[in-house]
Amino acid sequence: MGSVPAGTVTGRPAPSRLRAYDRLLDGVDPRDLTAAEIYPPGWEEPGALDWAGDWFTGLTAYFEAAARDGHAVVVWLD
């Protein structure tokens, strides 16, 4: 596995309008998530969209700190 030279990848913190989890969910229709078979199932249950709110806040702070300090964040989805 190789490395990426410093300064090759740059980023910036998310705009403040995207930092609030409830704003992120604006326009999200649980029926669309169910129809698209987005995992996990059960999007139409009460509170189904709320579970990630606490995680989102911490993750946003993590990405902002990495960008502020010039660190890369590599995300691998399999």
Image: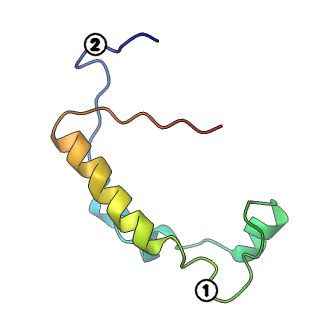
Q: Is residue 70 above or below residue 37?
A: above
Q: Is residue 1 above or below residue 14?
A: above
Q: Residue at x 80, y 59 (%)?
A: 36
Q: Is residue 2 above or below residue 9?
A: above
Dot 1: element = loop
Q: 12 and 76: which one is in front?
A: 76
In terms of image quadrants, where is residue 49? bottom right
Residue assigned mark 2? 5
Residue 26, image x and y in percent? 52, 73
The residue under label 1 is which amino acid type? Gly
Disc 2 crowd rating (10 Å Cα; few below 14, some 14-19, many 20+) is: few
The residue under label 2 is which amino acid type? Pro
Name the outermost residue toward the front: 1
Q: Decide which of tag 1 and tag 2 comes sooner along the chain.
A: 2
Q: 35 and 65: which one is in front?
A: 65
In terms of image quadrants, where is residue 9? top left
Figure colour scheme? rainbow
Q: Residue at x 72, y 85 (%)?
A: 45
The quadrant the C terminus occupies is top right
Residue 44, image x and y in percent? 74, 81
Q: Do tag 1 and tag 2 residues touch (Cβ < 8 Å)?
A: no
Residue assigned mark 1? 47
Q: Residue at x 27, y 58 (%)?
A: 61
Q: Is residue 53 above or below residue 67?
A: below
